[in-house]
Image (cartoon, rainbow, N blue to C red):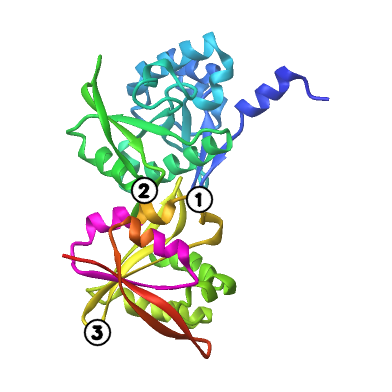
């Protein structure tokens, strides 16, 4: 039987993995070696080559060491090395500032965890910060935390862009003792980004849900080759605009718009596991902030009342009845319109 002390040690040493990275906890022994400027010893402890400029992070490492000495149970939440899996090199660091729910976030974002990171200069602009951030937040969700914030200087354009791409938006500001005025940003649970060909593999699986396809009387199911041919071809049409819907960092489906006989028509699809959470309504509302064409129409089968409610929540109204063919039957439906 594992003792409680041993179990805590095992949890603290858990390495979080992403596609290219291992996120390795920075232990007190490692931090003490770095702060003593004994980089060979620090490299031996962590088993990674250490980059030039690591000592520039001494202030934050000293702060995290004090936290760990006061409360060792914080280890899984605090600093981790970003390490390349294909070669043992530390390319940056990432971690939460504290365990979730610190007192200083009580008014703005109760229960949240604040995320911070740095990728060292030789390894920037390769997507590592985004990849590490998404992996760390996925891990935090397994620990019961789904609310995240960042603090970023308004003039730090690269970090602001990264945060926006991860679904963070400004909720306030504060004055940091070192960095001065910083925006406080919180991650939305639902957000949009550009849909990619990689996302199409997941969307292909969604459209294979025969019961869902029948309920919405959607387009006919296609085989993999035909589906990707259709995806690539329609993605090249300038008037088509398709966005991936993300919920708590996971791709849940897509929302988009296409022209049908000169009329702009919205469409969306969610994987079944994401139904009933209010995701479609929020995603469509966000999409309508981007999509400026008006009027817009949406076509919905009468047997799909949930989608009728989604469109109505976003300002669409029923303008006429309609029928559409689906697997040999004429399915009754409505045409809804969002006017200009």
Span of residues in magenta? 284-309
Residue 82 drawn at (x, y percent): 46, 37
Earlier in the chain: of badge 1 and badge 3, it is 1
Along the viewing direction, whichever of 54 and 222 lies nearer the viewer? 222
Tell me if residue 102 is in the magenta stretch.
no
Secondary structure beneath dot 1 equals loop
Residue 80 drawn at (x, y percent): 48, 30
Residue 271 drawn at (x, y percent): 51, 61
| Farthest-out residue, right | 1
Give the residue pinned by disc 1.
Answer: 19
For the point 17% across and 33% down, the residue is: 155
Residue 127 has which mark? 2
Q: Would you say residue 22 is visible in this rendering?
A: yes
Q: Which is in the foreground here, disc 1 or disc 3?
A: 3
Q: Quadrant of residue 61?
A: top left
Earlier in the chain: of badge 2 and badge 3, it is 2
The reply to whether callout 1 and callout 2 are in contact (CB within 8 Å) is no
For the point 64% across and 28% down, the residue is: 11
For the point 51% across and 33% down, the residue is: 145
Residue 222 drawn at (x, y percent): 50, 81
Q: Would you say residue 194 is visible in this rendering?
A: no
The reply to whether callout 2 and callout 3 are in contact (CB within 8 Å) is no
- Measured along the vertical axis of the image, is residue 223 above or below residue 146? below
Quarter of the picture holding the N terminus: top right
Quarter of the picture holding the C terminus: bottom left
């Amino acid at each position: 039987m594992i003792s409680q002390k041993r179990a805590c040690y095992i949890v603290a040493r858990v390495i979080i993995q992403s596609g290219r990275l291992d996120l390795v906890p920075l232990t007190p022994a490692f931090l003490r070696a770095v702060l003593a400027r004994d980089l060979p010893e620090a490299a031996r402890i962590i088993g990674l080559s250490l980059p030039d400029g690591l000592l520039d992070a001494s202030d934050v490492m000293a702060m995290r060491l004090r936290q760990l000495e006061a409360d060792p149970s914080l280890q899984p939440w605090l600093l981790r090395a970003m390490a390349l899996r294909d070669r043992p090199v530390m390319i940056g660091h990432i971690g939460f500032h504290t365990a979730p729910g610190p007192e200083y976030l009580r008014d703005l974002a109760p229960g949240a965890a604040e995320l911070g990171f740095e990728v060292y200069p030789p390894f920037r602009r390769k997507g590592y910060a985004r990849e590490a951030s998404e992996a760390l937040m996925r891990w935090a969700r397994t620990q019961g935390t789904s609310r995240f914030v960042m603090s970023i200087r308004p003039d730090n354009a690269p970090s602001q862009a990264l945060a926006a791409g991860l679904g963070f938006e400004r909720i306030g500001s504060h004055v940091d003792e070192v960095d001065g005025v910083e925006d406080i940003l919180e991650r939305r649970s639902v957000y949009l980004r550009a849909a990619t060909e990689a996302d199409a593999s997941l969307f292909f699986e969604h459209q294979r849900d025969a019961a869902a396809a029948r309920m919405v009387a959607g387009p006919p199911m296609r085989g993999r080759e035909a589906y990707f041919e259709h995806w690539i071809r329609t993605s090249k049409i300038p008037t088509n605009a398709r966005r991936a819907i993300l919920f708590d960092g996971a791709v849940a489906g897509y929302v988009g718009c296409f022209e049908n006989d000169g009329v702009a028509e919205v469409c969306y699809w969610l994987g079944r596991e994401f139904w009933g959470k209010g995701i479609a309504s929020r995603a469509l509302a966000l999409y309508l902030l981007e999509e400026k064409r008006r009027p817009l129409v949406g076509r919905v089968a009468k047997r799909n009342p949930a989608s009728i409610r989604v469109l109505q929540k976003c300002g669409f109204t029923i303008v006429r009845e309609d029928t559409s063919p689906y697997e040999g039957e004429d399915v009754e439906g409505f045409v809804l319109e969002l006017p200009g």
